[in-house]
Amino acid sequence: MTKKTLTAMFIPIFVLLYASSCSGSIPGGLAGVLLFIAVALAQFIVKR
Amino acid sequence: MLTILSLLPLLILLSCLLAFKMTTGRAGALAVLAAILIAFCFFGLDLLGLTVAMSKGMTLSLYVLLIIWSAVFLYQLVYEFNAIDVINQNILIFIKDPFTQFLLLAWLFSSVLQGIAGFGVPVIIVVPILIHLGFDPLASVAAVLLGHSWSVSFGSMGSSFFTIALVTGLEQQSIGYGMAIFDSVAMIMMGLMVCYIYGKWEYVKKGMVYIIPTSLVMIFVMLTVLYLKLVSLVGLLTALSGLITMYLIYCLQEKQRKKVDLYKGNLTLAKALLPYSMIIALSLLFQGFNLGKYSIAFQYPAFVTGLGYEVAQQSAYAKIKIFGHPAPIIMLSATAAILVYKQSGIWDREKFKNVLNRTINSSASTSTSLVFLITMALVMMDSGMTTALALKVSEITGGLYPIVAPFFGVLGSFITGSNTNSNVIFGKFQVDLAAALGVNGFIMAGLQSIAGSIGVSLGPTTILMASSASGLTGRESEIYKIVIKPVLLTALIMGILNYLLLIVFRLNLGGVL
Protein backbone atom coordinates (compact mmCIF):
# COMPACT_ATOMS: atom_id res chain seq x y z
CA MET A 1 0.00 0.00 0.00
CA THR A 2 1.38 3.42 -0.94
CA LYS A 3 0.77 6.94 0.31
CA LYS A 4 -1.21 7.70 -2.87
CA THR A 5 -3.54 4.71 -2.34
CA LEU A 6 -4.20 5.81 1.21
CA THR A 7 -4.92 9.38 0.12
CA ALA A 8 -7.35 8.07 -2.51
CA MET A 9 -9.17 6.16 0.25
CA PHE A 10 -10.44 9.47 1.57
CA ILE A 11 -12.82 9.78 -1.40
CA PRO A 12 -15.16 6.86 -0.48
CA ILE A 13 -14.83 7.74 3.22
CA PHE A 14 -15.93 11.30 2.51
CA VAL A 15 -18.91 10.11 0.44
CA LEU A 16 -19.92 7.66 3.17
CA LEU A 17 -19.59 10.17 5.99
CA TYR A 18 -21.40 12.94 4.14
CA ALA A 19 -24.26 10.69 3.00
CA SER A 20 -24.65 9.37 6.55
CA SER A 21 -24.58 12.90 8.02
CA CYS A 22 -27.42 13.97 5.73
CA SER A 23 -29.54 10.84 6.13
CA GLY A 24 -28.72 10.20 9.80
CA SER A 25 -27.70 6.64 8.95
CA ILE A 26 -25.94 5.04 11.92
CA PRO A 27 -24.50 1.98 10.06
CA GLY A 28 -23.17 4.21 7.25
CA GLY A 29 -21.65 6.61 9.78
CA LEU A 30 -20.06 3.74 11.68
CA ALA A 31 -18.55 2.34 8.48
CA GLY A 32 -17.17 5.78 7.55
CA VAL A 33 -15.68 6.37 11.00
CA LEU A 34 -14.11 2.90 11.10
CA LEU A 35 -12.64 3.29 7.60
CA PHE A 36 -11.19 6.66 8.58
CA ILE A 37 -9.62 5.08 11.69
CA ALA A 38 -8.22 2.28 9.50
CA VAL A 39 -6.59 4.83 7.15
CA ALA A 40 -5.12 6.68 10.14
CA LEU A 41 -3.67 3.45 11.53
CA ALA A 42 -2.38 2.45 8.08
CA GLN A 43 -0.06 5.49 8.18
CA PHE A 44 2.22 3.36 10.31
CA ILE A 45 2.60 0.58 7.76
CA VAL A 46 2.58 2.64 4.57
CA LYS A 47 5.67 2.93 2.34
CA ARG A 48 7.19 6.42 2.59
CA MET B 1 -10.07 16.39 34.09
CA LEU B 2 -11.95 17.44 30.95
CA THR B 3 -9.41 20.24 30.35
CA ILE B 4 -6.50 17.80 30.49
CA LEU B 5 -8.34 15.45 28.12
CA SER B 6 -8.99 18.39 25.74
CA LEU B 7 -5.28 19.12 25.67
CA LEU B 8 -4.30 15.51 25.04
CA PRO B 9 -4.65 15.43 21.20
CA LEU B 10 -2.49 18.58 20.96
CA LEU B 11 0.07 17.17 23.40
CA ILE B 12 0.21 13.94 21.41
CA LEU B 13 0.75 15.91 18.20
CA LEU B 14 3.46 18.03 19.79
CA SER B 15 5.35 15.18 21.41
CA CYS B 16 5.13 12.97 18.30
CA LEU B 17 6.58 15.72 16.12
CA LEU B 18 9.19 17.10 18.46
CA ALA B 19 10.20 14.31 20.81
CA PHE B 20 9.63 11.26 18.60
CA LYS B 21 10.41 13.06 15.31
CA MET B 22 7.45 11.47 13.47
CA THR B 23 6.20 12.77 10.13
CA THR B 24 3.23 15.17 10.22
CA GLY B 25 1.07 12.44 8.65
CA ARG B 26 1.77 9.93 11.41
CA ALA B 27 1.64 12.47 14.22
CA GLY B 28 -1.63 13.81 12.79
CA ALA B 29 -3.04 10.28 12.56
CA LEU B 30 -2.35 9.60 16.25
CA ALA B 31 -3.71 13.01 17.26
CA VAL B 32 -6.96 12.56 15.30
CA LEU B 33 -7.42 9.06 16.74
CA ALA B 34 -6.95 10.45 20.25
CA ALA B 35 -9.43 13.26 19.53
CA ILE B 36 -12.05 10.78 18.21
CA LEU B 37 -11.61 8.48 21.23
CA ILE B 38 -11.75 11.29 23.82
CA ALA B 39 -14.72 13.01 22.14
CA PHE B 40 -16.65 9.72 21.98
CA CYS B 41 -15.80 8.43 25.48
CA PHE B 42 -15.64 11.59 27.61
CA PHE B 43 -17.39 14.47 25.79
CA GLY B 44 -20.58 12.63 24.86
CA LEU B 45 -20.13 12.97 21.08
CA ASP B 46 -22.30 10.10 19.79
CA LEU B 47 -21.82 8.29 16.49
CA LEU B 48 -24.02 10.68 14.52
CA GLY B 49 -22.21 13.71 16.00
CA LEU B 50 -18.88 12.09 15.19
CA THR B 51 -20.02 11.41 11.61
CA VAL B 52 -21.08 15.03 11.16
CA ALA B 53 -17.88 16.44 12.72
CA MET B 54 -15.60 14.19 10.67
CA SER B 55 -17.51 14.87 7.48
CA LYS B 56 -17.22 18.61 8.14
CA GLY B 57 -13.48 18.13 8.60
CA MET B 58 -13.21 16.43 5.24
CA THR B 59 -15.37 19.07 3.54
CA LEU B 60 -13.13 21.79 4.89
CA SER B 61 -10.06 19.83 3.81
CA LEU B 62 -11.47 19.62 0.28
CA TYR B 63 -11.90 23.39 0.16
CA VAL B 64 -8.26 24.02 1.15
CA LEU B 65 -6.80 21.11 -0.82
CA LEU B 66 -8.33 22.33 -4.08
CA ILE B 67 -6.26 25.51 -3.69
CA ILE B 68 -3.12 23.59 -2.75
CA TRP B 69 -3.40 21.09 -5.62
CA SER B 70 -4.01 23.74 -8.27
CA ALA B 71 -1.24 26.03 -6.94
CA VAL B 72 1.26 23.16 -6.88
CA PHE B 73 0.24 22.19 -10.44
CA LEU B 74 0.75 25.74 -11.71
CA TYR B 75 4.13 26.03 -10.02
CA GLN B 76 5.30 22.70 -11.44
CA LEU B 77 4.11 23.80 -14.89
CA VAL B 78 6.02 27.11 -14.95
CA TYR B 79 9.05 25.43 -13.37
CA GLU B 80 9.19 22.55 -15.87
CA PHE B 81 8.83 24.85 -18.89
CA ASN B 82 11.49 27.26 -17.51
CA ALA B 83 9.12 30.22 -17.23
CA ILE B 84 10.21 30.72 -13.60
CA ASP B 85 13.84 30.89 -14.79
CA VAL B 86 12.96 33.69 -17.22
CA ILE B 87 11.31 35.64 -14.35
CA ASN B 88 14.29 35.09 -12.01
CA GLN B 89 16.94 36.06 -14.56
CA ASN B 90 15.17 39.29 -15.40
CA ILE B 91 15.10 40.34 -11.75
CA LEU B 92 18.86 39.90 -11.55
CA ILE B 93 19.41 42.04 -14.68
CA PHE B 94 17.67 44.96 -13.02
CA ILE B 95 19.47 44.93 -9.62
CA LYS B 96 23.27 45.14 -9.42
CA ASP B 97 23.89 46.07 -5.74
CA PRO B 98 24.41 42.89 -3.60
CA PHE B 99 22.61 44.22 -0.49
CA THR B 100 19.62 45.33 -2.56
CA GLN B 101 19.60 41.96 -4.33
CA PHE B 102 19.67 40.15 -0.97
CA LEU B 103 16.89 42.24 0.60
CA LEU B 104 14.72 42.33 -2.51
CA LEU B 105 14.95 38.60 -3.13
CA ALA B 106 14.71 37.38 0.48
CA TRP B 107 12.09 39.85 1.72
CA LEU B 108 9.97 40.68 -1.33
CA PHE B 109 10.52 38.31 -4.24
CA SER B 110 10.05 35.32 -1.93
CA SER B 111 6.84 36.98 -0.71
CA VAL B 112 5.60 37.41 -4.29
CA LEU B 113 6.17 33.68 -4.81
CA GLN B 114 4.37 33.02 -1.54
CA GLY B 115 1.47 35.09 -2.84
CA ILE B 116 1.26 32.87 -5.90
CA ALA B 117 2.19 29.41 -4.72
CA GLY B 118 3.51 29.10 -1.18
CA PHE B 119 3.87 25.61 0.25
CA GLY B 120 7.67 25.89 0.44
CA VAL B 121 8.07 27.24 -3.10
CA PRO B 122 9.72 30.56 -2.03
CA VAL B 123 12.35 28.66 -0.08
CA ILE B 124 13.03 26.18 -2.87
CA ILE B 125 13.39 28.90 -5.51
CA VAL B 126 14.98 31.88 -3.75
CA VAL B 127 17.54 30.13 -1.53
CA PRO B 128 19.42 28.52 -4.48
CA ILE B 129 19.36 31.86 -6.38
CA LEU B 130 20.93 33.68 -3.41
CA ILE B 131 23.58 31.00 -2.97
CA HIS B 132 24.23 31.08 -6.73
CA LEU B 133 24.80 34.84 -6.43
CA GLY B 134 27.52 34.21 -3.84
CA PHE B 135 25.73 34.81 -0.52
CA ASP B 136 26.44 32.65 2.54
CA PRO B 137 24.14 29.56 2.50
CA LEU B 138 23.17 29.79 6.19
CA ALA B 139 22.43 33.51 5.90
CA SER B 140 20.47 32.90 2.68
CA VAL B 141 18.31 30.20 4.27
CA ALA B 142 17.60 32.24 7.43
CA ALA B 143 16.86 35.39 5.43
CA VAL B 144 14.38 33.67 3.09
CA LEU B 145 12.68 31.74 5.91
CA LEU B 146 12.13 34.95 7.87
CA GLY B 147 11.80 37.30 4.90
CA HIS B 148 8.74 35.69 3.38
CA SER B 149 7.09 34.61 6.64
CA TRP B 150 4.97 37.79 6.94
CA SER B 151 3.29 36.96 3.62
CA VAL B 152 2.28 33.35 4.34
CA SER B 153 -1.15 34.08 5.79
CA PHE B 154 -2.41 36.11 2.84
CA GLY B 155 -0.32 34.05 0.40
CA SER B 156 -0.99 30.82 -1.50
CA MET B 157 -4.00 32.53 -3.05
CA GLY B 158 -5.43 32.94 0.46
CA SER B 159 -5.67 29.32 1.63
CA SER B 160 -4.69 30.12 5.27
CA PHE B 161 -6.90 33.18 5.23
CA PHE B 162 -9.93 31.25 3.96
CA THR B 163 -9.28 28.59 6.59
CA ILE B 164 -9.34 30.99 9.54
CA ALA B 165 -12.56 32.48 8.19
CA LEU B 166 -14.08 29.02 7.78
CA VAL B 167 -13.10 27.56 11.15
CA THR B 168 -14.11 30.66 13.11
CA GLY B 169 -17.24 31.34 11.07
CA LEU B 170 -16.40 35.08 11.13
CA GLU B 171 -16.84 37.49 8.23
CA GLN B 172 -13.82 37.37 5.87
CA GLN B 173 -13.18 41.05 5.22
CA SER B 174 -13.13 42.02 8.90
CA ILE B 175 -10.74 39.19 9.76
CA GLY B 176 -8.60 40.52 6.89
CA TYR B 177 -8.46 43.97 8.52
CA GLY B 178 -7.52 42.33 11.81
CA MET B 179 -4.74 40.44 10.04
CA ALA B 180 -3.55 43.61 8.28
CA ILE B 181 -2.84 45.29 11.66
CA PHE B 182 -0.44 42.55 12.75
CA ASP B 183 0.91 41.85 9.27
CA SER B 184 2.13 45.45 9.11
CA VAL B 185 4.25 44.81 12.21
CA ALA B 186 5.45 41.46 10.88
CA MET B 187 6.47 42.79 7.44
CA ILE B 188 8.56 45.62 8.94
CA MET B 189 10.16 43.35 11.53
CA MET B 190 11.04 40.70 8.96
CA GLY B 191 12.50 43.27 6.57
CA LEU B 192 14.74 44.55 9.37
CA MET B 193 15.71 40.98 10.30
CA VAL B 194 16.84 40.29 6.72
CA CYS B 195 19.03 43.43 6.85
CA TYR B 196 20.46 42.29 10.21
CA ILE B 197 21.31 38.88 8.81
CA TYR B 198 23.07 40.53 5.85
CA GLY B 199 25.30 42.89 7.83
CA LYS B 200 24.18 43.44 11.44
CA TRP B 201 23.12 46.93 12.64
CA GLU B 202 25.04 48.79 9.93
CA TYR B 203 22.76 47.31 7.28
CA VAL B 204 19.66 47.66 9.45
CA LYS B 205 20.25 51.41 9.29
CA LYS B 206 21.00 51.24 5.57
CA GLY B 207 17.92 49.11 4.96
CA MET B 208 15.55 51.63 6.60
CA VAL B 209 15.65 53.65 3.37
CA TYR B 210 13.95 50.74 1.65
CA ILE B 211 11.93 49.17 4.44
CA ILE B 212 9.93 52.12 5.77
CA PRO B 213 8.60 53.54 2.45
CA THR B 214 8.15 50.07 0.94
CA SER B 215 6.19 48.87 3.98
CA LEU B 216 3.97 51.97 3.92
CA VAL B 217 3.09 51.30 0.28
CA MET B 218 2.47 47.61 1.01
CA ILE B 219 0.19 48.41 3.98
CA PHE B 220 -1.81 50.80 1.79
CA VAL B 221 -2.12 48.21 -1.00
CA MET B 222 -3.07 45.49 1.49
CA LEU B 223 -5.91 47.57 2.93
CA THR B 224 -7.10 48.64 -0.53
CA VAL B 225 -7.19 45.08 -1.87
CA LEU B 226 -9.04 43.97 1.27
CA TYR B 227 -11.50 46.82 0.85
CA LEU B 228 -12.12 45.63 -2.73
CA LYS B 229 -12.68 42.14 -1.26
CA LEU B 230 -10.09 40.57 -3.56
CA VAL B 231 -9.03 38.39 -0.66
CA SER B 232 -7.21 35.71 -2.61
CA LEU B 233 -4.99 38.41 -4.16
CA VAL B 234 -4.00 40.30 -1.01
CA GLY B 235 -0.70 38.48 -0.58
CA LEU B 236 0.33 38.65 -4.23
CA LEU B 237 -0.57 42.29 -4.87
CA THR B 238 0.88 43.50 -1.55
CA ALA B 239 4.23 41.83 -2.15
CA LEU B 240 4.25 42.86 -5.81
CA SER B 241 3.65 46.50 -4.89
CA GLY B 242 6.53 46.22 -2.42
CA LEU B 243 8.80 44.73 -5.07
CA ILE B 244 8.03 47.56 -7.50
CA THR B 245 8.38 50.25 -4.82
CA MET B 246 11.72 48.97 -3.61
CA TYR B 247 13.01 48.77 -7.16
CA LEU B 248 11.94 52.35 -7.83
CA ILE B 249 13.71 53.50 -4.66
CA TYR B 250 16.81 51.63 -5.83
CA CYS B 251 16.64 53.38 -9.24
CA LEU B 252 16.25 56.77 -7.58
CA GLN B 253 19.22 56.07 -5.32
CA GLU B 254 21.40 54.85 -8.14
CA LYS B 255 20.23 57.78 -10.26
CA GLN B 256 20.44 55.64 -13.32
CA ARG B 257 17.73 54.36 -15.55
CA LYS B 258 19.62 52.97 -18.46
CA LYS B 259 17.83 50.94 -21.02
CA VAL B 260 18.47 47.29 -20.32
CA ASP B 261 17.99 44.23 -22.50
CA LEU B 262 15.59 41.75 -21.00
CA TYR B 263 16.66 38.15 -20.54
CA LYS B 264 14.86 35.98 -23.02
CA GLY B 265 15.18 32.25 -22.64
CA ASN B 266 12.65 30.09 -24.43
CA LEU B 267 9.89 32.57 -23.48
CA THR B 268 9.56 36.34 -23.29
CA LEU B 269 9.04 37.87 -19.84
CA ALA B 270 5.42 38.73 -20.72
CA LYS B 271 4.70 35.13 -21.69
CA ALA B 272 6.47 33.79 -18.59
CA LEU B 273 4.36 36.05 -16.41
CA LEU B 274 1.11 35.27 -18.26
CA PRO B 275 -0.42 32.75 -15.80
CA TYR B 276 0.15 35.14 -12.89
CA SER B 277 -1.26 38.13 -14.78
CA MET B 278 -4.26 35.98 -15.67
CA ILE B 279 -4.87 35.03 -12.04
CA ILE B 280 -5.04 38.72 -11.19
CA ALA B 281 -7.22 39.55 -14.21
CA LEU B 282 -9.66 36.66 -13.66
CA SER B 283 -9.98 37.36 -9.94
CA LEU B 284 -10.84 40.97 -10.76
CA LEU B 285 -13.26 39.89 -13.49
CA PHE B 286 -15.14 37.38 -11.33
CA GLN B 287 -15.26 39.88 -8.48
CA GLY B 288 -16.87 42.41 -10.82
CA PHE B 289 -19.73 40.10 -11.83
CA ASN B 290 -22.07 38.57 -9.30
CA LEU B 291 -21.55 34.91 -10.10
CA GLY B 292 -21.87 33.67 -6.50
CA LYS B 293 -24.96 31.60 -7.32
CA TYR B 294 -22.80 29.06 -9.16
CA SER B 295 -21.44 27.25 -6.15
CA ILE B 296 -21.08 23.93 -4.36
CA ALA B 297 -21.97 23.85 -0.66
CA PHE B 298 -22.61 21.18 1.96
CA GLN B 299 -25.41 20.89 4.50
CA TYR B 300 -25.09 19.55 8.01
CA PRO B 301 -27.73 18.95 10.71
CA ALA B 302 -27.66 20.45 14.20
CA PHE B 303 -26.97 18.19 17.18
CA VAL B 304 -26.34 18.27 20.93
CA THR B 305 -23.57 16.30 22.65
CA GLY B 306 -24.10 14.20 25.75
CA LEU B 307 -22.61 17.04 27.82
CA GLY B 308 -25.13 19.51 26.39
CA TYR B 309 -22.81 21.28 23.94
CA GLU B 310 -24.95 22.57 21.05
CA VAL B 311 -23.71 22.50 17.46
CA ALA B 312 -25.69 24.65 15.02
CA GLN B 313 -27.11 23.50 11.67
CA GLN B 314 -25.04 24.43 8.61
CA SER B 315 -26.97 25.19 5.44
CA ALA B 316 -23.99 26.15 3.23
CA TYR B 317 -20.82 24.80 4.80
CA ALA B 318 -17.43 25.44 3.12
CA LYS B 319 -19.10 26.98 0.08
CA ILE B 320 -16.98 26.63 -3.06
CA LYS B 321 -17.84 29.34 -5.58
CA ILE B 322 -17.11 28.14 -9.12
CA PHE B 323 -16.26 31.72 -10.15
CA GLY B 324 -14.60 32.89 -6.96
CA HIS B 325 -12.72 30.00 -5.37
CA PRO B 326 -8.99 30.29 -6.24
CA ALA B 327 -8.70 26.75 -7.69
CA PRO B 328 -10.77 27.28 -10.90
CA ILE B 329 -9.01 30.61 -11.48
CA ILE B 330 -5.57 29.02 -11.09
CA MET B 331 -6.53 26.12 -13.38
CA LEU B 332 -7.85 28.49 -16.07
CA SER B 333 -4.57 30.43 -15.88
CA ALA B 334 -2.59 27.20 -16.11
CA THR B 335 -4.59 26.26 -19.22
CA ALA B 336 -3.72 29.62 -20.77
CA ALA B 337 -0.04 28.99 -19.96
CA ILE B 338 -0.22 25.60 -21.69
CA LEU B 339 -1.69 27.23 -24.83
CA VAL B 340 1.11 29.84 -24.82
CA TYR B 341 3.78 27.15 -24.41
CA LYS B 342 2.26 25.28 -27.37
CA GLN B 343 2.15 28.44 -29.47
CA SER B 344 5.80 29.22 -28.55
CA GLY B 345 6.89 25.76 -29.69
CA ILE B 346 8.21 24.61 -26.30
CA TRP B 347 5.40 22.18 -25.50
CA ASP B 348 6.60 18.71 -24.60
CA ARG B 349 4.34 15.81 -23.59
CA GLU B 350 7.07 14.20 -21.45
CA LYS B 351 7.57 17.41 -19.51
CA PHE B 352 3.83 17.64 -18.91
CA LYS B 353 3.83 14.08 -17.57
CA ASN B 354 6.59 15.16 -15.16
CA VAL B 355 4.41 18.08 -14.09
CA LEU B 356 1.49 15.77 -13.33
CA ASN B 357 3.65 13.21 -11.52
CA ARG B 358 5.39 15.80 -9.38
CA THR B 359 2.07 17.48 -8.54
CA ILE B 360 0.55 14.18 -7.39
CA ASN B 361 3.65 13.10 -5.46
CA SER B 362 4.14 16.38 -3.66
CA SER B 363 0.42 16.73 -2.88
CA ALA B 364 -0.18 13.23 -1.47
CA SER B 365 1.58 13.67 1.90
CA THR B 366 0.27 17.19 2.38
CA SER B 367 -3.28 16.04 1.64
CA THR B 368 -3.22 13.20 4.17
CA SER B 369 -1.70 15.34 6.94
CA LEU B 370 -4.16 18.14 6.23
CA VAL B 371 -7.20 15.82 6.37
CA PHE B 372 -6.05 14.39 9.72
CA LEU B 373 -5.31 17.75 11.29
CA ILE B 374 -8.48 19.45 10.04
CA THR B 375 -10.63 16.47 11.12
CA MET B 376 -8.96 16.54 14.54
CA ALA B 377 -9.75 20.25 14.86
CA LEU B 378 -13.40 19.72 13.81
CA VAL B 379 -13.89 16.79 16.21
CA MET B 380 -12.40 18.92 19.01
CA MET B 381 -14.63 21.85 18.06
CA ASP B 382 -17.92 19.97 17.62
CA SER B 383 -17.45 17.95 20.82
CA GLY B 384 -16.87 21.12 22.87
CA MET B 385 -13.25 20.21 23.66
CA THR B 386 -11.85 23.45 22.16
CA THR B 387 -14.34 25.56 24.10
CA ALA B 388 -13.53 23.75 27.37
CA LEU B 389 -9.81 24.32 26.78
CA ALA B 390 -10.29 27.94 25.80
CA LEU B 391 -12.31 28.68 28.93
CA LYS B 392 -9.65 27.13 31.18
CA VAL B 393 -6.74 29.04 29.57
CA SER B 394 -8.78 32.23 29.75
CA GLU B 395 -9.45 31.57 33.45
CA ILE B 396 -5.73 31.07 34.20
CA THR B 397 -4.27 33.97 32.20
CA GLY B 398 -7.21 36.35 32.63
CA GLY B 399 -6.81 39.79 31.06
CA LEU B 400 -3.18 39.09 30.12
CA TYR B 401 -4.14 36.42 27.58
CA PRO B 402 -3.85 38.75 24.53
CA ILE B 403 -0.07 38.92 25.17
CA VAL B 404 0.20 35.12 25.21
CA ALA B 405 -2.14 34.63 22.22
CA PRO B 406 0.42 34.94 19.35
CA PHE B 407 2.53 32.16 20.84
CA PHE B 408 -0.35 29.74 20.21
CA GLY B 409 -0.32 30.71 16.53
CA VAL B 410 3.46 30.27 16.36
CA LEU B 411 3.16 26.95 18.19
CA GLY B 412 0.56 25.69 15.71
CA SER B 413 2.82 26.40 12.75
CA PHE B 414 5.88 25.12 14.58
CA ILE B 415 4.08 21.83 15.20
CA THR B 416 2.57 21.35 11.77
CA GLY B 417 4.74 23.48 9.47
CA SER B 418 1.61 25.11 8.08
CA ASN B 419 -0.19 28.39 8.73
CA THR B 420 -3.40 26.77 7.48
CA ASN B 421 -3.11 23.93 10.00
CA SER B 422 -2.22 26.35 12.80
CA ASN B 423 -5.40 28.28 12.02
CA VAL B 424 -7.40 25.07 11.98
CA ILE B 425 -6.09 23.98 15.37
CA PHE B 426 -6.12 27.31 17.19
CA GLY B 427 -8.40 29.60 15.15
CA LYS B 428 -11.65 28.74 16.88
CA PHE B 429 -9.85 28.41 20.20
CA GLN B 430 -8.55 32.00 20.00
CA VAL B 431 -11.93 33.40 18.98
CA ASP B 432 -13.65 31.51 21.81
CA LEU B 433 -11.13 33.01 24.23
CA ALA B 434 -11.77 36.49 22.86
CA ALA B 435 -15.48 35.94 23.46
CA ALA B 436 -14.79 34.69 27.00
CA LEU B 437 -12.75 37.85 27.68
CA GLY B 438 -15.40 40.04 26.06
CA VAL B 439 -12.96 41.45 23.46
CA ASN B 440 -13.05 41.67 19.67
CA GLY B 441 -12.88 38.28 17.91
CA PHE B 442 -11.83 39.67 14.51
CA ILE B 443 -8.63 41.16 15.95
CA MET B 444 -7.86 37.95 17.82
CA ALA B 445 -8.49 35.86 14.68
CA GLY B 446 -6.24 38.23 12.69
CA LEU B 447 -3.52 37.92 15.30
CA GLN B 448 -3.76 34.11 15.25
CA SER B 449 -3.35 33.97 11.49
CA ILE B 450 -0.35 36.31 11.33
CA ALA B 451 1.33 34.67 14.33
CA GLY B 452 0.86 31.37 12.49
CA SER B 453 2.33 33.04 9.41
CA ILE B 454 5.62 34.00 11.08
CA GLY B 455 5.69 30.64 12.87
CA VAL B 456 5.94 28.85 9.51
CA SER B 457 9.64 29.76 9.38
CA LEU B 458 10.09 27.42 12.38
CA GLY B 459 8.07 24.56 10.86
CA PRO B 460 10.05 21.32 10.65
CA THR B 461 8.98 20.71 7.05
CA THR B 462 9.99 24.25 5.98
CA ILE B 463 13.36 23.98 7.75
CA LEU B 464 14.02 20.59 6.15
CA MET B 465 13.05 21.94 2.73
CA ALA B 466 15.40 24.91 3.22
CA SER B 467 18.32 22.78 4.39
CA SER B 468 17.96 20.42 1.43
CA ALA B 469 17.66 23.33 -1.04
CA SER B 470 20.86 24.89 0.30
CA GLY B 471 23.00 21.82 0.85
CA LEU B 472 22.85 22.36 4.62
CA THR B 473 21.33 18.97 5.43
CA GLY B 474 22.25 17.99 8.98
CA ARG B 475 22.78 21.62 10.04
CA GLU B 476 19.12 22.30 10.84
CA SER B 477 19.89 23.20 14.46
CA GLU B 478 22.08 26.09 13.20
CA ILE B 479 19.17 27.35 11.09
CA TYR B 480 16.84 27.11 14.11
CA LYS B 481 19.30 29.10 16.22
CA ILE B 482 19.22 32.04 13.79
CA VAL B 483 15.50 31.96 13.05
CA ILE B 484 13.92 31.33 16.47
CA LYS B 485 14.84 34.61 18.21
CA PRO B 486 13.40 36.98 15.56
CA VAL B 487 10.18 34.94 15.44
CA LEU B 488 9.69 34.98 19.22
CA LEU B 489 10.57 38.68 19.43
CA THR B 490 8.05 39.53 16.70
CA ALA B 491 5.40 37.37 18.42
CA LEU B 492 6.00 39.23 21.70
CA ILE B 493 5.67 42.63 20.00
CA MET B 494 2.44 41.45 18.35
CA GLY B 495 1.19 40.21 21.74
CA ILE B 496 1.83 43.57 23.39
CA LEU B 497 0.10 45.35 20.49
CA ASN B 498 -2.81 42.92 20.78
CA TYR B 499 -3.08 43.66 24.52
CA LEU B 500 -3.09 47.41 23.88
CA LEU B 501 -5.73 47.15 21.14
CA LEU B 502 -8.04 44.72 22.93
CA ILE B 503 -7.69 45.51 26.62
CA VAL B 504 -6.41 49.10 26.82
CA PHE B 505 -8.11 50.73 23.80
CA ARG B 506 -10.99 48.21 23.52
CA LEU B 507 -10.81 48.47 19.72
CA ASN B 508 -13.86 47.12 17.96
CA LEU B 509 -13.63 45.70 14.46
CA GLY B 510 -16.36 43.97 12.52
CA GLY B 511 -18.46 44.31 9.40
CA VAL B 512 -16.82 47.48 8.11
CA LEU B 513 -13.60 49.29 8.95
Image (cartoon, coloured by chain):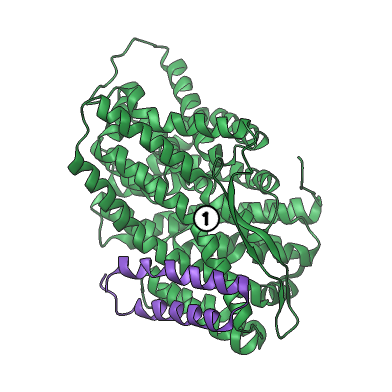
Residue shown at 53%/75% (left/top)? Answer: B10
The image quadrant of residue B324 is top right
The answer to whether B492 is drawn above or below residue B140 in the figure is below
Residue shown at 41%/72% (left/top)? Answer: B17
Can residue B26 be seen by looking at this rendering? yes
Tag 1, which chain?
B
Instruction: Report x, y in % for residue B33.
Output: 48, 81
Instruction: Report x, y in % for residue B8.
Output: 55, 81
Q: How many marks?
A: 1
The image quadrant of residue B90 is top left
The answer to whether B306 is drawn above or below residue B460 in the figure is below
The amino acid type found where label 1 is placed reads: Tyr
Instruction: Report x, y in % for residue B460.
Output: 39, 62
Q: Colour of chain B?
A: green
Asked if residue B444 lies left or right of residue B102, the reply is right
The answer to whether A5 is drawn above or below residue B347 in the figure is below
The answer to which of B258 and B433 lies nearer the viewer is B433
Asked if residue B300 lies left or right of residue B213, the reply is right
Q: Colour of chain A?
A: purple
Q: Which residue is mark 1?
A: B63
Residue shown at 44%/29% (left/top)? Answer: B277
The answer to which of B74 and B321 lies nearer the viewer is B321
Asked if residue A9 lies left or right of residue B11, the reply is left
Q: Name the element at disc 1.
A: helix
Instruction: Report x, y in % for residue B331.
Output: 41, 41
Can you say which quadrant of the picture contains the C terminus of chain A? bottom left
* Few, some or many residues within 10 Å of mark 1 (<14, 14–19, 20+): many
The image quadrant of residue B491 is bottom right
